[in-house]
Image: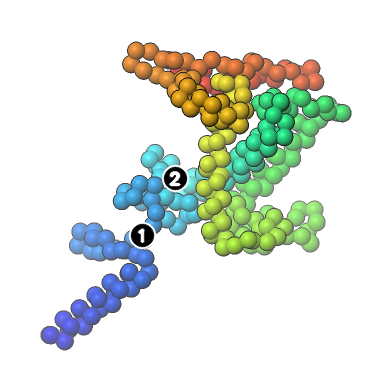
Amino acid sequence: MSAILSAGRAHVAFSSKSVQRTGFRAVSNGSRVTMSASRPLWLPGSTPPAHLDGSMTGDFGWDPLGLGANPEAMTWFREAELQNGRWAMMGVFGILVQELVKPDIFWYDAPTKIDLPFNIIGIVAFQAFAMHYVEVRRWQDLRKPGSVNKDPIFSNYSLPEHEPGYPGGIFAPFVPGDLEELKLKELKNARLSMLAFVGFVMQAQITGKGPIACWTDHLADPFGTTIFSKAVITLGGAVKPTCQIPDHVTFQGIDIPTPCFFEGFWP
């Protein structure tokens, strides 16, 4: 009997050391003990939802509305986050570079300053067709991974097997580091860029200036030029922002509406 107890104690001690080495911790669950990975969370010490088990890159246990509880929806949300985040990173970079190179041109209406030698309607029509084609193929790849790896016209060209959202091949001729680490960095920058782009838009509508000009104004008057000096809600009322951009712009004889999005947010 003592030999059995000694063997049991040795097994528990060995298991505990193994858990410490692999970065897992034991969690009591009533009459049984389960293992959960120790990982960074948006709120240290919080309990993430069951569907956020840490297996997905960039998962910090944040889903207060439970939108990702459906696995199919979660897959689509991740793809949407990647695509919108990548567009946002390019957009934010472009806005900052444009204001540095041409500070006299307001980024919000910069496209209307371009003198095109052809009609814009043709570009819009081609873009609608091209984007529709690309989005359909991306949806097919998401629905059935690997189904669109081969070029539909030049069949001798194809992409290697890949995870949806990360095609590799000619789209990633070299990987400058650990791929999983790069995925996490991309997601963090993508999320930050999406927030930044929304901030640039709201800032432009309220001030009529670009982000660098607004930053310069804030440095000149740190307490007088803030988000609260433009808009704030108090118990006694509200300081409402005013729209500083025109309600439309005209390009090649076409009137394009440019409404202020924030006006419906205020009482």
Residue 34 at x, y = what percent?
29, 63
Question: Which quarter of the figure has residue 194?
Answer: top right
Hey, which residue is sitting farthest left in the picture? 1
The local secondary structure at tag 2 comes to loop
Hey, which residue is sitting farthest bottom in the picture? 3
Which residue is at the front of the view, 12 or 111? 111
Give the number of the disc on residue 153. Answer: none
Crowding at mark 1 (Cα within 10 Å: few <14, some 14-19, many 20+): few
Mark 2 is on which residue type?
Gly
Residue 93 at x, y = what percent?
64, 40
Residue 58 at x, y = what percent?
48, 51
Q: Visible in this render: residue 82?
A: yes
Disc 1: which residue: 38
Hey, which residue is sitting farthest right in the picture? 117
The local secondary structure at tag 1 comes to loop
| Mark closer to the observer (2, 1) | 1
- Vertical comparison of 242 with 160: above or below: above
Residue 25 at x, y = what percent?
31, 63
Name the residue located 64 percent from the left edge and 36 percent from the top edge: 96
Crowding at mark 2 (Cα within 10 Å: few <14, some 14-19, many 20+): some
Q: CA distance from mark 2 to mark 1?
A: 21 Å
Disc 2: which residue: 68
Mark 1 is on which residue type?
Ser
Question: Which quarter of the figure has residue 3?
Answer: bottom left
* Sooner in the amino-acid sequence: mark 2 or mark 1: 1
Q: Visible in this render: residue 47?
A: no
Q: Are marks 2 and 1 in contact (CB under 8 Å)?
A: no
Which residue is at the front of the view, 94 or 175? 94
Which residue is at the front of the view, 246 or 139? 246
- Vertical comparison of 246 with 98: above or below: above
